[in-house]
Amino acid sequence: MRRVVLALALLFATGVRAEEKAFYVLGAGADSCERFIAAAEEQPPGTYKAISNGDEPYVNAISKYQQWMMGYVSAINADRGDEGRQIKLDLTEVDSWMRNWCSRNPRRTVFHALQAFVKTH
């Protein structure tokens, strides 16, 4: 009987932890921090370079990361709902934080960096 109680206790104790969800990251978030930093090198945080080509402007590589980051933060805010829990930082602040984190973790992905950002904000 004692073994059964112990086995059940262990079974339920492991079930308390949050489940890890497997999912596929799409877009710029799947890129490495190393690629993000390389794209960011030529621009100050929160800025990008655009060149008009007639129909639509061409923008440099950092722009795709910035747009992905802002979309991710917007999705987190939508999920949080409560205005008091939402992330209310501008692009320059998020971009600067990401550059610092990615510089220390170049082998991780942009998604991992933004996940760490969200956990701290």
Image (tube, rainbow, N blue to C red):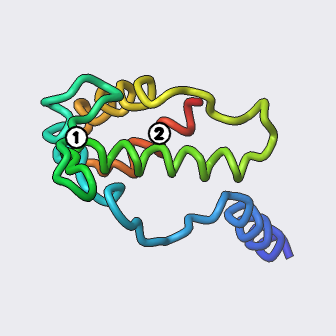
Residue 12 image point, x, y percent = 77, 67
Q: From what the image shows, is residue 107 above or below residue 22?
A: above
Residue at horizontal 66 percent and vertical 59 percent from the top: 18
Query: What residue did someone put label 2 on?
Result: 116
Label 2 sits on a secondary structure element that is: helix
Q: Amino acid at mark 2?
A: Ala
Residue nearest the observer in this picture, 66 or 24:
66
Q: Tell me if 88 is positioned left or right of 85 in this view.
A: left
Q: Is residue 23 left or right of residue 53?
A: right
- Residue type of the residue flagged with mark 1: Ala
From the viewer's perspective, is 25 left or right of 109? right
- Relative to residue 27, is residue 90 drawn left or right? right
Label 1 Cα neighbours within 10 Å, binned few <14 / some 14-19 / many ≥20: few
Where is mark 1, residue-wise? Answer: 50
Of 39 and 32, nearer the camera is: 39
| Identity of the residue drawn at 78% across and 30% down | 84
